[in-house]
Amino acid sequence: MQKIMPCLWFQNNDGAEAIAFYSAIFRNSRIVSEIYWGKEGGDKEGSLLAATFELDGMRFQVLNGGAHDAFNDAISLSIECKDQAEVDYYWDRLLEGGGTPVACSWLKDRFGISWQVVPEVLPRLLADPDQAKADRVMAAMMKMVKIDVAAIEAAAKG
């Protein structure tokens, strides 16, 4: 069991829609539990209050909590990708329905959640003991929105 679980607070009662969206993108996803508003919810009665769901084995909570602080970049969800095809898959899918590309592997999905779509080669090259190589990779990355693996690897070679 996962001891610490991120809770995503949705303002517009779109937690169920978000779960369906993410579950269609990430393989091995499932809803673990759901709690629905009862009579005390007034006009929300029968709608989703909270849920626990898994995306590729990681558990998240959703709370349809109503008006509160909006999602921002202070917390993001990072996806480690094995290659460019996987970067492209997650990037394109998370932008569906109104997401926004940001910069340097970051995007916001249509619910306002920030994601980082990162090929596994990027952090390895950024931490390379050859500082000149790491600097070239950083300079290349800073010009990108979606990460281009071939361009990152070319920058590493000089």
Image (tube, helix red, strand yellow):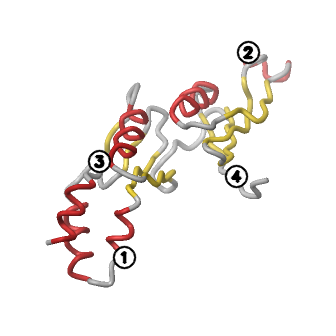
Which residue occupies the foreground of this view, 61 or 9? 61
Element at label 1: loop
Query: Which class describes the residues within 10 Å of circle 3: few (<14), some (14-19), or many (20+)?
Result: many
Q: Which residue is mark 1?
A: 127
**Mark 3 vs 2, N-terminal side:** 2
Q: Is the C-beta separation of discs 4 and 3 under 8 Å?
A: no
Question: Of the residues tagged 4 and 1, which is closer to the observer?
Answer: 1
Name the amino acid, label 3. Lys
Q: For the residues marked 4 and 2, what is the alpha-carbon distance in whole angstroms?
A: 29 Å
Q: Which mark is residue 5?
A: 4
Q: Residue at image x 42%, y 53%? A: 82
Q: Which mark is residue 146?
A: 3
Q: Residue at image x 22%, y 55%? A: 150
Q: Quadrant of residue 132?
A: bottom left
Q: Is the C-beta separation of discs 4 and 1 under 8 Å?
A: no
Q: Which residue is mark 2?
A: 43
Question: Of the residues tagged 4 and 2, which is closer to the observer?
Answer: 4
Element at label 3: loop
Q: For the residues marked 4 and 3, what is the alpha-carbon distance in whole angstroms?
A: 27 Å
Question: Of the residues tagged 4 and 3, which is closer to the observer?
Answer: 3
Question: Of the residues tagged 1 and 2, which is closer to the observer?
Answer: 1
Q: Residue at image x 41%, y 60%? A: 120
**Mark 4 vs 1, N-terminal side:** 4
In the image, is 137 to the left or to the right of 105? left
Q: For the residues marked 3 and 2, what is the alpha-carbon distance in whole angstroms?
A: 41 Å
| 128 in relation to 36, above or below | below
Element at label 2: helix
Q: Position of residue 1 (x, y in %)?
A: 79, 53
